[in-house]
Amino acid sequence: MANIDRIVNVQISLNTAEISREGFSTGLIVGAHAHTLGRVQTYTSLDGMMNDGFTVADPIFQAANDYFAQIPKPKHVKIGRQKCAVELTVADIEETETYSVFTLTKDSAGNVTTLAYRYKNVGYTDVEDILTGIANLILADADAVVNPVIGGGTLTLGAKAGKDFAIKVSDNLSTRALTSTEAIAKTMAEIVAEDNDFYGIMLMSRRQIDIMAMAAWTEAHTKIFGTAINEDGAKDASSMTDTGYLLQKNNYFRTFWFYHQDAENDYPECAVMARCFSILPGGETWANKRLAGVTPSQLTETEYLSITYKNGNTFEKFRNISITQNGKTAAGEWIDVIRFRDWLVEEISNRIFTLLVNNDKIPYTDAGITRVEAQIRSALELGQARGGIAPTEYDENHNRNLGFTVTVPLSSQISFGQKASRILEDVEFTARLAGAIHCVEVRGNLTYDNLIVDRLATGGVA
């Protein structure tokens, strides 16, 4: 049978490629734990975290609880793992009970190996006997990936020969992550190598050295980092050693900090990030937000002014409502402006990239330049629709005040050499930020004097 292609040949190309977009509404909680082998895990609920071994006593779980408690809230949160040793304790002693420890490790090919250590309690032995029995089982295993150390009623399991590991235990045992000795830069390098699709970073450590290291790392990446401190120096305008002062001194535009009286157990930065990430970039402000599950700080006006003098943020009670105050990064810029700017850069880049890869050719002519201009305008119009860029407005004389302008060169203005390079330059735009109203000042007068009476066109008195 003859092929119809001889007469009619139809081929349809798919010009629908689109580069992936950064997740400007995705948060990452970074902390020490050994519940999973992956550097990054994504959770849509606290139940999923408990299934992986997290307990309500884990700081990471408590931070995630503050994250998920907001209304509205993002759909998921990512947990970034910092390597650490694990402290194991006996939760319950029962005769003939079996105490089980499972270590998991993964080779370069991704194959997971699980090693099981089961110690059966014979008679009512004490805690030390049980932990010693588990430790001896591990020491006797030439393939073990952890080193056991007993002391003070606990069993510490650390990495052996630099091997990475995860720990699972039976219900009669409990684990606690110890302070990590892994450098923040190393942790973040491993995290982004595995999954870089996140924007907001929350760090469990409240140590100044760790906060400053994370702030330095974040400043070099298109992310934002939030933390909380309860240092007395943060409330003292003259202090020059507290973390808030150092963050401001280093002019960190991508880090924001809260003074919080219970910063060791409460995570206002997680709550506000979740609350604001539920809103598309451009539509939010980080001040005046109510946070569920977070206890407000009790501050004097002097303390508040000292904190904001260092560009810090607070969560305080106003009569019967508690809200966030300030909404700035350590460098003094509004958090929402940084987020919106990052989103706009990504939006314009992706639109132009998509234009270039989905067309066989964009000619270096007025028509081709206009197509590039159209992509920029579309991104700016979307920024207007989302509330980040001001709309066209009018002054008292009815003159237009544009929300944005875009300028591109004419093809005739571009040199032969520039066209030969195939790089389009001198494409520029200016946009007015819409900003946000955080507070209102009203001045009024009460008087017995007569006021001006306006008469309506019908002769009535207004």
Image (tube, helix red, strand yellow):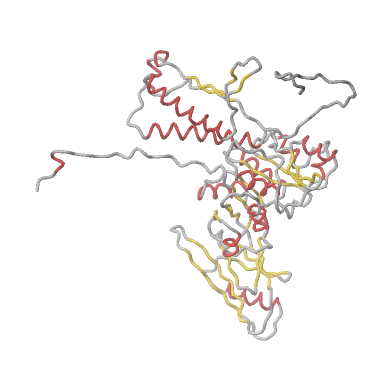
Q: Is residue 196 above or below residue 220?
A: below
Q: Position of residue 68 (x, y in %)?
A: 63, 54
From the viewer's side, name the closer residue of 221 and 287.
Answer: 287
From the viewer's side, name the closer residue of 81 and 138.
Answer: 81
Residue 390 appears left or right of 106: right
Q: Residue at x 51, y 49 (%)?
A: 195
Q: Is residue 457 above or below residue 299?
A: above
Q: Residue at x 60, y 28 (%)?
A: 390
Q: Position of residue 435 (x, y in %)?
A: 65, 31
Q: Is residue 435 above or below residue 77?
A: above
Q: Residue furthest bottom?
A: 123
Is residue 163 among what the camera can see?
no
Q: Quadrant of residue 171?
A: bottom right
Q: Position of residue 98 (x, y in %)?
A: 61, 79
From the viewer's side, name the closer residue of 143 and 267.
Answer: 267
Q: Residue at x 55, y 62 (%)?
A: 165
Q: Is residue 424 above or below residue 290?
A: above
Q: Position of residue 36 (x, y in %)?
A: 56, 61
**Number of marks:** 0
Q: Quadrant of the C terminus?
A: top right
Q: Residue furthest right?
A: 448
Is residue 328 among what the camera can see?
yes
